[in-house]
Amino acid sequence: QVQLVESGGGLVQAGGSLTLSCVRSRTIFSINAMGWYRQAPGKERESVATIAGGGRRYYADSVKGRFTISNDNAKNTVYLQMNSLKPEDTAVYYCAALSNLTPRYWGRGTQVTVSS
């Protein structure tokens, strides 16, 4: 089992920035990527950003150029730097540990609210 704990959410005005953090309890051999997902009210959960082996990064089109995912293996922590936030970025953001790009473990989520 892997426990994932997110932090850093909050209320921010449009155009502002937030940095989310996700600390994982331990490293598992089968987990080869980390990702951030989000779910807005009434919508399905969607992938926002993924970081895999070799530093490969993938982003949803809606956040490209604004969000940056990074990983600090020494701290077992993955970050999501979010800039130029928009009201449509409002959602609960979840951290996930992935195996072959499939989520295997989830955090409980952190709320991000962007006011206009």
Image (spheres, rainbow, N blue to C red):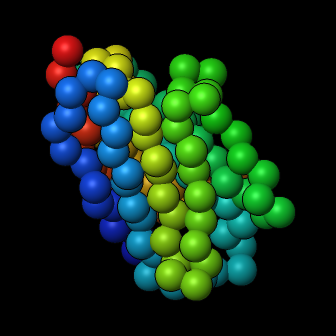
Q: Is residue 37 left or right of residue 51?
A: left
Q: Is residue 51 left or right of residue 90?
A: right
Residue for point 52% across, 31% down: 66
Residue for point 57% across, 50% down: 69
- Which is nearer the eye, 50 or 45? 50
Residue 18 placed where, x, y %? 33, 45
Q: Residue furthest right?
A: 54
Residue for point 41% across, 27% down: 84
Asked whether residue 39 is in view, the answer is yes
In the figure, residue 6 lies in which quadrant?
bottom left
Q: How many marks?
A: 0
Residue 38 placed where, x, y %? 41, 36
In the figure, residue 55 lies in which quadrant?
bottom right
Asked whether residue 104 is in view, the answer is no
In the rendered image of this protein, does residue 56 appear above or below residue 28? above
Residue 102 placed where, x, y %? 66, 50
Quadrant for the C terminus in the image: top left
Residue for point 55% across, 20% down: 62
In the rendered image of this protein, does residue 54 appear above or below residue 62? below
Q: Is residue 46 left or right of residue 40?
A: right
Residue 92 placed where, x, y %? 29, 39
